[in-house]
């Protein structure tokens, strides 16, 4: 990825939404149990309806999560938390979080570090332009399923929540064909991958 113009981010604080607190309680339990989902490094071994993530490095205790604060909207929060942070939030049933955001009006993305790159606002060219082109190309699709099939040809490793975000970002599609639940998208992605 060729990174050109990363705009400064503004620091802010956010209270953990209640569903995130609940999610982190579950993660804390997995950590206590030594579950393999929290001892194996991954991007997405830990899953919920509105978030996914995993352990950053084998043997480490830092976790990274992608959280979708609003259903059906593309904005994401990137959270980076240690096992100790998660334990404190689980114990207190609440917490605040330092997050950085863009200056761009309307950008709902939030990041765990000030030097993060916003996929929507920063000029990260190749990757974003490519995705825009692909999404434009997919506007000729005839059905929901066809759209997802074509999408997966370009982004075979995309997470189902990411696919839903991109699908909903093309506002005409949910209007015409309706929205996906996570379960529906997971089932469709599995079926299409098996079709090969
Ligand atoms: Zn942004």
Image (spheres, rainbow, N blue to C red):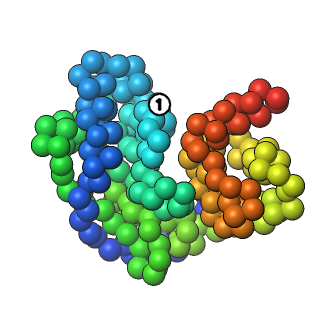
- Count of numbered circles on the image: 1
Residue 15 visible here: yes
| Residue where numbered disc 1 is placed | 45
Residue 132 visible here: no
Name the residue located 71 percent from the left edge and 41 percent from the top edge: 156
Quarter in which the C terminus is drawn: top right
Query: Mark 1 vs ligand 1: CB under 8 Å?
Result: no
| Quadrant of the image occupied by residue 35 | top left
Near mark 1 (Cα within 10 A), the count class, few <14, some 14-19 or many ≥20, is some
Residue 55, given in percent of the width and then of the height, sits at 38, 34
* Secondary structure under the numbered disc 1 in the rendered image: loop
Choose between 114 and 158: the one closer to the eye: 158
Name the residue located 63 percent from the left edge and 60 percent from the top edge: 168
Name the residue located 57 percent from the left edge and 72 percent from the top edge: 123
Name the residue located 45 percent from the left edge and 54 percent from the top edge: 68
Residue 155, given in percent of the width and then of the height, sits at 71, 47
| Quadrant of the image occupied by residue 8 | bottom left
Residue 135, given in percent of the width and then of the height, sits at 74, 61
| Quadrant of the image occupied by residue 142 | bottom right
Q: Is residue 83 left or right of residue 55?
A: left
Choose between 29 and 12: the one closer to the eye: 29
Q: Is residue 161 left or right of residue 113?
A: right
Above or below, 119 relative to 52: below
């Amino acid at each position: 990825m060729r990174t050109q113009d990363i705009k400064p981010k503004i620091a802010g604080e956010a209270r953990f939404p209640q569903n995130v607190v609940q999610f982190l309680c579950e993660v804390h339990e997995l950590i206590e149990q030594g579950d393999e989902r929290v001892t194996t490094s991954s991007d997405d071994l830990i899953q919920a309806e509105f978030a996914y993530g995993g352990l950053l490095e084998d043997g480490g205790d830092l976790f990274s999560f992608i959280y979708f604060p609003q259903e059906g909207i593309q904005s994401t929060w990137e959270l980076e938390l240690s096992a100790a942070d998660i334990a404190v939030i689980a114990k207190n049933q609440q917490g605040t979080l330092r997050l950085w955001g863009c200056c761009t009006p309307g950008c709902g993305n939030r990041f765990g570090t000030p030097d993060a790159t916003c996929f929507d606002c920063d000029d990260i060219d190749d990757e974003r332009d490519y995705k825009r082109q692909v999404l434009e190309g997919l506007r000729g699709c005839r059905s929901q399923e066809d759209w997802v099939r074509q999408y997966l040809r370009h982004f075979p490793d995309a997470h189902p929540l990411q696919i839903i975000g991109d699908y909903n970002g093309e506002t005409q599609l949910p209007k015409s064909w309706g929205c996906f639940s996570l379960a529906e998208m997971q089932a469709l992605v599995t079926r299409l991958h098996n079709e090969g």
